[in-house]
Image: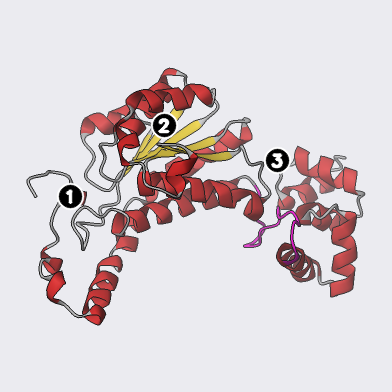
Amino acid sequence: MLDDRLTEQRNPRSEEVDRLSAEEIVRLINAEDAGVAAAVGAEAAAIARAARLAAEAFRTGGRLLYVGAGTSGRLGVLDAAEMPPTYGSAPEMVQGVIAGGREALVRAQEGAEDDEEAGAEAMDAKAVDSRDLVFGIATSGTTPFVHAALARARERGARTVFLLCTPASPALRHSHDVVIAPLAGPEVVAGSTRMKAGTATKMVLNAVTTTAMILCGKVDGNLMVDLQVTCRKLQDRGERILMTKLGLEREAARVLLAGAGGHVKTAIVMERLGMTREEAREALAEAGGMVRAVAALAGAGRP
């Protein structure tokens, strides 16, 4: 393919893919996907550094801003959109910026990825500052929109993370606080980075935000205790979490959750420490949102 980027190389295992049956194609795709998790796992240390930076941004009032084009941008927007219902976070806490704007979410805007000026302007429009973490996603490693956005973000004092699926140059690693490069290998269809590279990207983003939210106290055990009831499914989940954590019957859990304003974490502290809703919220704020730390503070005689 006369291109040094790993994502643009031809995969020798799929060079005759157009001669295969439908089932053989599916099995080949599945076999290629099987190596993605290992590629992501090899970047665990870098992913953890990015997660710690995200948690630090959240604690200081900053944001995690994903920036990407095409599939990369859509995956960033998707991950951002899933944070409020899962962790009760404010919508502005994790945001996705995609080249071409909202229309690019449903219809490809291929030329938008080359617009460097738009990338820089997007960071100005978001008023990026030193509290923020800007996370660029460009699986090929070369998307001009993303590079320009990251450069402007650094000018504005933000920390930056860069995710690509081809080997990173020393210069690139020097330019950012964290570089994550899961090498999933050439795609079954050469250059179609919505496949293995897209899967690797989704896995990395899942790991970053999940880890950051756990570090910020939005999970107790493995339960999403910062859940805010906004629909029947979350009402049911919230009640079941309280039943599990506190040993309550369903009706008691329902009453307690209502008294906590539909906030599971507040309900847990209210029940365990005999606090009012306001007292529980104040205690959680003092403990940095950590349910386990609230009991320790109460045990130390602090209000």
In the image, what residue type sits under mark 2?
Thr
Kind of element beneath mark 1: helix
* Residue 62: quarter of image: top right
Residue 48 can be seen in this image = no
Residue 66: x and y in percent read 46, 39
Q: Which mark is residue 8?
A: 1
In the image, what residue type sits under mark 1?
Glu
Check whether the beta carbons of the residues at disc 3 and disc 1 lie within 8 A of each other: no
Kind of element beneath mark 3: loop
The vertical placement of 72 against 203, above or below, is above
Give the alpha-carbon distance from disc 3 to disc 1, as whole Å.
45 Å
Q: Which mark is residue 288?
A: 3
Check whether the beta carbons of the residues at disc 3 and disc 2 lie within 8 A of each other: no
Q: Residue at x 89, y 43 (%)?
A: 278
Q: What is the span of residues highlighted in magenta in the rendered image?
A: 217-232
Which of the two discs, 3 and 1, labels the residue nearer the N terminus?
1
Q: Which mark is residue 109?
A: none
- The majority secondary structure of the magenta stretch comes to loop
Give the alpha-carbon distance from disc 3 to disc 2, as whole Å.
25 Å
Q: Residue at x 31, y 27 (%)?
A: 175
Residue 36: x and y in percent read 31, 61
**Residue that numbered label 2 is attached to:** 160
The 10 Å Cα crowd at callout 1, few under 14, some 14 to 19, many 20 or more, is many
Query: Viewed as shown, does residue 19 lie left or right of 282?
Result: left
